[in-house]
Amino acid sequence: MSLKQVDLSEEDLAFHKEVGLINRWWQSPKQSHVQRQIFHVIKAEKHRFGVHRPYTASDVASLRSSLGVEYPASVQALKLWSLLHEHRRNGTAEMTFGMIDPVMASQMEGQQTIYVSGALCAFSKADCIGQDMSDYPWDTVPKAASTIFKSQVYHDARQRQDRMRRSKEERATMSHARDYLLPIVADADMGFGSQTATMKLVKRLVEAGVAMFHLDDLSLSGKRFTDGGGHTVVSTREYLRRLGAARLQLDIMGAETLILCRCDIDGAQYITTDIDPRDHPYILGATVDVEPLASLGNASSARVKEWKRRAKVKTFDETVECNATEEQITEYHHLLKSKSVCSLQERQRIAGQVLKGKEVFFDWQSARTCDGRYLYSPSVQAILDRSLAAAPLGDATWARMDLIMDKLVKFHNEFRKVYPERLFACGYSATFPFPSMGYSDEDVKNFHRSLAKLGIVWQVQPGFALQGLNYTTKKFSSMFGEEGIGGYVRDIQEPAMKVDTDGYEKMQWSGGYITDAYGDLLAGL
C-alpha cells in the first residue's frame, strides 16, 4: 500500500456525482416500481408500490468502493424483470424446476429460468450431505449457481462461434439459436446468520450471476422434520432486517438482482420472540393456570399437544371472544381496527374497557418451550400482514403455503388490493396429495393456469433434480442391468441421435469447433 495526496475538492465532487447517479438509478422503472402513495385497504395505512429504503443515496455512496464494478447479474435481472412482467400482463406463468447440474441446465429448452435450490445443494453439493437443515456452508448455493452461470456463458460463446464461422446463407438454413443465458433464481434460505452474513451471501450471489434470490423468515435453529415440532419463524422485525440487509448490499453493488420475499408462516408452530407487536395477534398463550410448558423439558410433540389441550391455548383475541357477548366482540374488533399496530398490552387495555373490568386469564410466557420459543398460530391473515410489511423491501412475493386454493385465492386477492402490480411466486411440493385434497385430474392439469390468474408468474417444482432423476435413474439402472448395451442403444442412444438434442454427441455442444478456433488463431506464432 502506498500513500497518496487527496484533492479534497475533487474528492467531494466525485462523491456528490456518485450520490447523483444513485438517486437517478433509484428512479429507474425497475428500482422505483412506480413510486406513489396508495391507501392500504387492509389496515388503513399508507404503503409504497416501490422499494422502500431506510437510508439515503449519500449513505450508500459512502459505503461503495471508488472502483465501480458492473455485474452480469444486473443484465440477467432486468431480463427476468421484463419476462415476469410480460407473464403478468398475459396472465401466464414461467414454469421451471430445480437444477444444480450445468450439463442438464443447458438442455432446459422449455424453461426461461433456472432454479438453484438449497435443499438440492444440501443433498448433492455440500461436503457433508444431508437433510435441508440450512446447515451447509453459506456459500454452497452461490458456488452451484456460479458453475451454472459460467457454463451458460460458455455455451453462449461456443454457439456464437459456431454460427459466425458459417455464411449468412448457411445460417438461414439452421434451426433457431438457443438462449442459454436463462436467468438464475437462487435459494438464499434465511440469510445464514447476522445482517453482515446476509450481506456477504447476497454479494456472492450477485457475483455468481444470480438474477433473483428468495430470502425467508425461518429460524435456523428450530428446524425439525420427523415429529412436526420445529417449524419456527423469526419476528417480523428480524425478517425485515434480513431483507433490508439484502437490499443495502444490492445498492452498494449497484446491482439489479431481484429480491423475492418469501414468507414461511403457513404451518409455523413457534416464533422466536414476542418483541414485535406486529406478531402479537398470532402468539398463543395458556388461558387456564397450569404448569409452564418449559417444565416438560425437551418434550415430544405428543406431550406438547397434551399440554396445549390442558392449557386451552388460544390467541388473546380468541380468549376475549370466549369471554364476551356478540356486541362486545364487535366493539372489541372495531377498536382494534382503529389502530395500525396493537400490542398485547394495548389489546388487554381495550379488552378491559369492553368487558367492563371482567378479568381474562391469558399467559403466553407459560406457553414458552424450554428453549424460549413462543407458541404461534398461523393464518392467512398472519401471512398477509407479514408479507405486506416486507413488500416495500423486495421486488416479488412468495407466500409459501399448502396448495389449498381457497387460501391461495384469499391471500393473493387481498394482497393485490394493496399492490395491484405485484409479482408473485409459488413452489410445488414433490409429495402434495392433489387427489386426496379434492382436486380432479382436470384441476391438476390446469392448476398452474389457475395460479397464473392470481398473478403468480413464477412457479417452480424444486424437487425434480431429486425425485425426477431418482425415478429416471432407477428405471434406467434396472433396464441396463438386464438388457445391457442393447437396451441403451434402443432407449437412449438412437432416440437422442434422432431428435434435436443439444448434447455431447454433437461437436458444436461439446465445444470442438471453438476449441479448434483457439488453436487456429494462435497457429501463426
Image (spheres, rainbow, N blue to C red):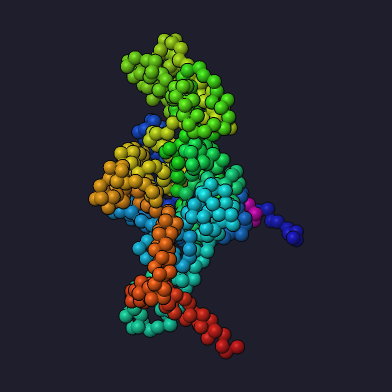
User: Residue lying furthest top in this view?
Assistant: 357
Report x, y in % for residue 324. Answer: 37, 15
Viewer-proximal residue, 417 or 467?
467
Stretch in magenta: 10-14
> How many marks on residues?
0
Which residue shows up at 57% across the image and 32% down it? 298
Viewer-proximal residue, 369 or 85?
369
Report x, y in % for residue 309. Answer: 44, 24
On screen, residue 306 versus residue 129, left or right, reads: left
Report x, y in % for residue 392. Answer: 45, 42
Note whether 309 is above or below 378 in the view shown: above
Note whether 190 is above or below 117 in the view shown: above
Viewer-proximal residue, 421 or 366?
366
Q: Is residue 98 visible?
A: no
Note whether 470 is above or below 270 in the view shown: below
On screen, residue 439 versus residue 501, left or right, reads: left
Which residue shows up at 36% across the image and 71% down it? 491
Q: Quadrant of residue 273?
A: top right
Q: Quadrant of the C terminus?
A: bottom right
Which residue shows up at 48% across the image and 63% down it? 101
On screen, residue 110 versus residue 285, left or right, reads: left
Which residue shows up at 47% across the image and 26% down it? 306
Q: Quadrant of the N terminus?
A: bottom right
On screen, residue 197 versus residue 257, left or right, reads: right
